[in-house]
Image: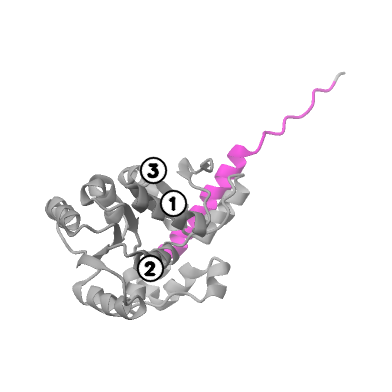
Amino acid sequence: MSERRALFGIELDPLTMDQTVERCLAAVRDGGQLEIGVVNAAKLVNMRRDPRLAEAVAGCDLVLADGQAVVWAGRVLRAPLPERVAGIDLFLRLLAEAESAGMSVYFLGARHEVLQEMLRRVADRFPALKVAGHRHGYFDDTEQEAVADAIAASGARMLFLGMTSPKKEIFTAAHGSRTGARVVHGVGGSFDILAGVTRRAPESWQRRGLEWLYRALQEPRRLGRRYLTTNAAFVLMTARERLRLSPSIVPANRSH
């Protein structure tokens, strides 16, 4: 097992996409349980401000670099990560693996109409996939245990949470094991992308770390200021951490 990398006080797993998929399949095969956390620049900034979010992410069995900016920061801060493991790409890989291996899945999240459209498109793309159950993501905190019990009753081996932060992380931390799912993966806005509600950035934008800009251009009023603020905070965080890691330059003593 690869030694974890410390970045901004959070331990990240230096895994490739293929290694991550294999770890997930092994958990299903061996009867283990794997709760997956993914972090991008915005989430790392928010974790500084939200102790519950930070605790929930830190408690995951795997913590992966979802954003290209996190990979770049790892290089700058001497905590190298092999590659970005984007949450949506991992989601699609696991759906394909689940389909071929006959592993059942459960989808939790999004609005009812978005979830229904995503289920339709997923059925077209993965026709042999076993969907054990699904539920929209709009439920009260008092319903969390009942939701977890319904997932457990479905017998799903993999659970995908299409909910926003910090709700999905807090649900996973509190009730992930109760769901009985062997793999619990919070995929954020991936349900909206699979349903065609929002568009994902082209690969050329992704490679340049500009997915945030592509999203902001789709919803400038809602996301523009937020992304600019969190990105600026992330750059500042990285610069401060780099200075902290750099040895102080002490002038040599001079003899008179």
Q: Which residue is mark 1?
A: 23
Which of the two discs, 3 and 1, sits closer to the camera? 1
Q: Which residue is mark 2?
A: 100
Mark 1: which secondary structure? helix
Lower position in the chain sequence, tag 3 or tag 1: 1
Badge 3: residue crowd in 10 Å (few <14, some 14–19, many ≥20): some
At label 3, the amino acid type is Ala
Residue at 61% of width from left, 41% of height from top?
A: 243
- Range of magenta residues: 226-254
Residue 58, labelled with which disc? 3
| Residue 176 shown left or right of residue 193 in the figure | left
Residue 23 image point, x, y percent: 44, 51
At label 2, the amino acid type is Ser
- For the residues labelled 3 and 2, the Cα–Cα distance comes to 32 Å
Mark 3: which secondary structure? helix
Residue at 15% of width from left, 50% of height from top?
A: 145
